[in-house]
Image: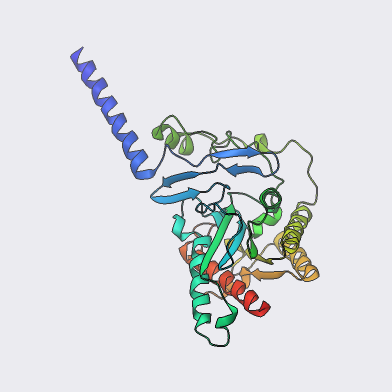
């Protein structure tokens, strides 16, 4: 009997130790929570602060991966940019808050404007002393999710709206809330323990994608539906009288030879036609990445960017934004 009690005590102690280590060191047991939304599909629950694998993640009152922005209209001396995106813009659990594209952009904008201010000819045209890049994004969002968000919340008094997409987003499905609480990547409540979350995430099978598909009928022309959503987002920016910038990052497989596949080429061509027709300011990162000396280092997987990739995207978009405002001046 004593042996049994000793074994039970050791087992319980070991379980408790594992629970503490998994919770403290890895951040399990406290994942980001999602809420279902009829129009957006899903949103990150407002007002969250968590750590995951040592990376700080903060979600504000508007479900953005940004700090609190109590006033929805920025003061005149603030250059506020609204960034709409997916997991590339969001950064996910693998990116520390200060290393997200939006945070890097804010720092780059500050440096670029400060450098312009030193120029006697341009300094008087750039009168910003504060810089904010609001990160409205979520994993697996496509243009129709982003459009729904912009319709719901508006542009927050931003002076520019940046829509950052990946080639894969041109094929994104319509917003669907079925994933929330059913797909382990979109939990709607905290798990009972960190250990259970770890086991369920990496050892248990995922819910089949077919069970998470939207029951409503969808357009046969998925690319066309997403292009129309992009057009509608541009219209929101035009209605708000702010600058609109569209940026597209490529998938890792599009770089080098043989390059994008036929359906990707066709989707990109249709996007280019929209850009030309609507006179959209557009950054295609495919040629930019291909010209990078070590483009494999720009990715952490087939879609998501490494810290180096985030830096390149942030610097390029920031330069374009500053150029738009200087040209406008």
Q: Residue 24's x, y, as percent?
A: 34, 41
Q: Would you identify the image quadrant in which residue 132 lies?
A: bottom right
Q: How is the image coloured?
A: rainbow
In this rendering, is residue 83 above or below 153? below
- State the count of labels: 0
Q: Which residue is nearer to you in this view: 152 or 268?
A: 152
Q: From the image, which quarter does the N terminus lie in?
A: top left
Q: From the image, which quarter does the C terminus lie in?
A: bottom right
Residue at 46% of width from left, 50% of height from top? 57
Q: Which residue is nearer to you in this view: 185 or 189?
A: 189
Q: Residue 268's x, y, as percent?
A: 72, 64
Residue at 76% of width from left, 71% of height from top? 279
Residue at 56% of width from left, 40% of height from top? 34
Q: Residue 95's x, y, as percent?
A: 46, 55
- The extreme top residue here reads 1
Q: Left or right: 59 with respect to 255?
A: left
- The extreme bottom residue here reads 121
Residue 238 visible in the displayed image: yes
- The extreme left residue here reads 2
In this rendering, is residue 2 above or below 112? above
In this rendering, is residue 5 above or below 320? above
Q: Residue 277's x, y, as percent?
A: 81, 69
In this rendering, is residue 19 above or below 111? above
Residue 303 visible in the displayed image: no
Q: Which residue is nearer to you in this view: 264 or 136?
A: 136
């Amino acid at each position: 009997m004593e042996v049994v009690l000793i074994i039970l005590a050791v087992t319980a102690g070991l379980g408790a130790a594992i629970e503490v280590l998994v919770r403290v060191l890895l951040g399990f047991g406290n994942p980001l929570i999602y809420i279902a939304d009829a129009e957006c599909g899903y949103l990150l629950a407002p007002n969250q602060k968590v750590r995951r694998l040592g990376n700080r993640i903060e979600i504000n009152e508007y479900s953005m991966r940004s700090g609190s922005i109590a006033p929805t209209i920025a003061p005149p001396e603030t250059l506020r940019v609204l960034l709409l995106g997916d997991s590339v813009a969001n950064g996910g659990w693998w990116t520390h808050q200060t290393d997200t594209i939006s945070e890097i952009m804010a720092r780059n904008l500050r440096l670029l404007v400060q450098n312009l201010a030193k120029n006697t000819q341009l300094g008087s045209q750039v009168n910003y002393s504060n810089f904010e890049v609001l990160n409205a994004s979520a994993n697996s969002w496509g243009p129709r999710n982003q459009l729904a968000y912009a319709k719901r919340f508006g542009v927050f008094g931003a002076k520019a709206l940046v829509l950052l997409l990946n080639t894969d987003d041109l094929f994104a499905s319509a917003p669907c809330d079925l994933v929330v609480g059913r797909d382990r990547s979109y939990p709607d409540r905290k798990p009972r323990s960190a250990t259970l979350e770890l086991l369920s995430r990496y050892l248990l099978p995922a819910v089949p994608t077919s069970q998470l598909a939207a029951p409503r009928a969808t357009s046969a022309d998925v690319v066309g539906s997403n292009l129309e959503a992009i057009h509608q987002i541009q219209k929101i920016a035009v209605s708000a009288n702010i600058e609109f910038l569209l940026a597209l990052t490529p998938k890792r497989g599009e770089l080098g030879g043989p390059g994008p596949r036929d359906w990707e080429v066709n989707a990109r061509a249709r996007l280019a036609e929209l850009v030309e027709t609507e006179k959209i300011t557009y950054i295609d990162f495919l040629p930019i990445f291909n010209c990078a000396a070590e483009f494999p280092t720009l990715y952490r997987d087939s879609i998501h960017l490494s810290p180096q990739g985030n830096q390149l995207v942030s610097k390029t978009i920031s330069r374009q934004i500053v150029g738009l405002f200087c040209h406008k001046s």
